[in-house]
Image (cartoon, helix red, strand yellow):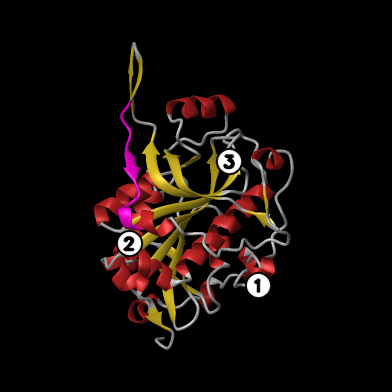
Amino acid sequence: MTKRRQPSDTQNCGPPEIDYTKLPAGGLLKTRELPGPTDAKLWNEVLLTVLPVDVLLLTVEDLEFLSCVSHLNRGYFRSNHGNLGTVYFGKMGTGPTFLKIAVMKCHSGPLTPGGALITVKNGVEVLRPKAVFCVGFCGGLRKKKVSLGDVAILAKLRTYSSITTTDNGIQERGLAVPLERNLLNLIKNADDGWKAPLKDSSEVKVWKDGVYLSGPEKVESEGRREELVKRFPDAIAIEMEGQGLFLAAHDLKVEWIVIKGVSNFADGKETEPWKKFASVMAASLTAHILSNPIRVESARGGSDFLAKVGAGVPADVK
């Protein structure tokens, strides 16, 4: 019998133990275990045999990146491109079809040099994915509602840094962007059949109606968190890359989504074990979604994303 962890259960203890043997890599990869520069494939070979990819996974921190690469099927590899830096390529999926995946890192923040906006712009132009998934860990805003380790799938993005200050208070000038309709249909059942890679029977809650706050500010203050909760009472999570992701994806007309695990409560009390747990859970759920092209196909409703991602690639195509 699975046990739902309550928010109060997670705030003063460590995370449940992860069963790393359930990851496709057989464990959580370490940086030293990744292919080195001398093992990289030439970009000309990538251009001829891999591109375009189906999905780009965007990460920031090492734990986020390693969690995503650890969920690629065996046989992944790296290559280097002048405008992108290092890109890892692999596959997700089982049976007769698979999806071609690229994994990249960007710098923290939406609009910084090398941040989400410029990285997504360059990545989409070169790799030509049909969708970009931003995967990793985030801060939770509702301590009485959200538990550490929960996974929040973005249903609406709100930016909070653009305001007008008047004698009567603050007027919001930020964006309020719902997820594109077909992806909203996809995430309704995103965790159907998903078994979190844990050694015990704990349940990892998946929030499929999450309102994310996104902006250039790293919030590590209870007072600031409560101020933002008062301004945006429907928000459950906060992070820094979604704004840049949306701006680039909107301009380039590509699908986008944010899937992140809650590793802290935006109060400066984040711990490394919860970072690792949140990153692995978010990557695991993302891999679950992308490992079943039929699931994606049924939600895409015949769009261009369906034509490329939903159909998958026959497994005998190299």
Q: Which portion, as a residue range, is magenta?
A: 172-182
Horizontal and vertical percent for residue 37?
A: 52, 72
Disc 2/disc 3 C-alpha distance (Å): 33 Å
**Callout 1 secondary element:** loop
Quarter of the picture holding the N terminus? bottom right
Horizontal and vertical percent for residue 316?
A: 42, 88
Instruction: Name the residue rendered at 62%, 61% in the picture.
Output: 196
Instruction: Choose the circle earlier in sequence order: 2 or 3.
Output: 2
Disc 3/disc 1 C-alpha distance (Å): 30 Å
- The residue to which callout 1 is attached is 26
**Callout 2 secondary element:** helix
Residue 94, numbered label: none
Instruction: Name the residue rendered at 50%, 75% in the picture.
Output: 77
Q: Residues within 10 Å of mark 1 (few under 14, many from 20)?
A: few
| Amino acid type of the residue tagged 3 in the rendering | Val
Q: Is the residue 149 above or below the residue 318 in the image?
A: above
